Image (cartoon, rainbow, N blue to C red):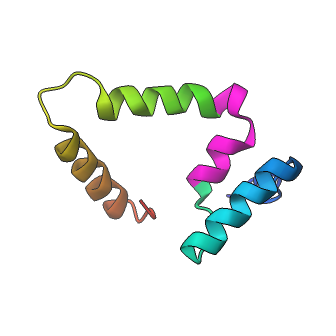
């Protein structure tokens, strides 16, 4: 299910950022980017901090191993990442 308010960027800055992603990549911004940018104070910043801790914090796995594992899980879940 898509949240309609995520489809329409709020403000000029968001429109420019999402437009730049479309121009540079040739695709619309992925839903995860739109979700994280929608209301960053409520969801995006806390989740971004968690993602950074999980992928870059102390671990027995290297950063590359964690990134590869995340990409594999995303592929299995048929996610763009």
Q: In the displayed image of the protein, which residue is found farthest to the bottom?
A: 26
Between 66 and 4, the one lying in front of the other is: 66
Q: Quadrant of the C terminus?
A: bottom left
Q: In the displayed image of the protein, which residue is found farthest to the top?
A: 58
Q: Position of residue 16 (x, y in %)?
A: 77, 58
Secondary structure mainly formed by the magenta segment:
helix
Residue drawn at point x = 23 percent, y = 49 percent? 69
Residue drawn at point x = 26 percent, y = 57 percent? 72
Asked if residue 80 lies left or right of residue 33, the reply is left
- Residue 57 visible from this viewpoint: yes
Looking at the rendered structure, the number of numbered marks drawn on it comes to 0
Q: Is residue 14 magenta?
A: no
Task: Place residue 50 in its image quadrant.
Answer: top left
- Residue 2 visible from this viewpoint: no
Asked if residue 7 lies left or right of residue 21, the reply is right
Task: Place residue 57 in its image quadrant.
Answer: top left
Asked if residue 21 lies left or right of residue 38, the reply is left
Between 16 and 40, the one lying in front of the other is: 16
Is residue 62 positioned above or below 17 on the image? above
Between 68 and 63, the one lying in front of the other is: 63
Residue drawn at point x = 22 percent, y = 21 percent? 58
Q: Position of residue 79 (x, y in %)?
A: 44, 62
Q: Is residue 41 magenta?
A: yes
Magenta residues? 32-43
Residue drawn at point x = 60 percent, y = 29 percent? 45
Q: Quadrant of the N terminus?
A: bottom right
Asked if residue 66 lies left or right of residue 4, the reply is left
Q: In the displayed image of the protein, which residue is found farthest to the left?
A: 60
Q: In the displayed image of the protein, which residue is found farthest to the right?
A: 11
Q: Position of residue 80 (x, y in %)?
A: 45, 64
Q: Position of residue 47 (x, y in %)?
A: 53, 31
């Amino acid at each position: 299910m898509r949240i309609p308010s995520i489809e329409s960027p709020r403000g000029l800055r968001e429109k420019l950022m999402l437009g730049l992603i479309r121009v540079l990549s040739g695709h619309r911004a992925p839903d995860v980017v739109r979700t994280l940018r929608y209301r960053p104070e409520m969801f995006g910043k806390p989740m971004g901090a968690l993602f950074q801790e999980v992928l870059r914090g102390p671990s027995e796995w290297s950063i590359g191993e964690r990134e590869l594992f995340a990409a594999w899980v995303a592929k299995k879940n048929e996610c763009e990442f």
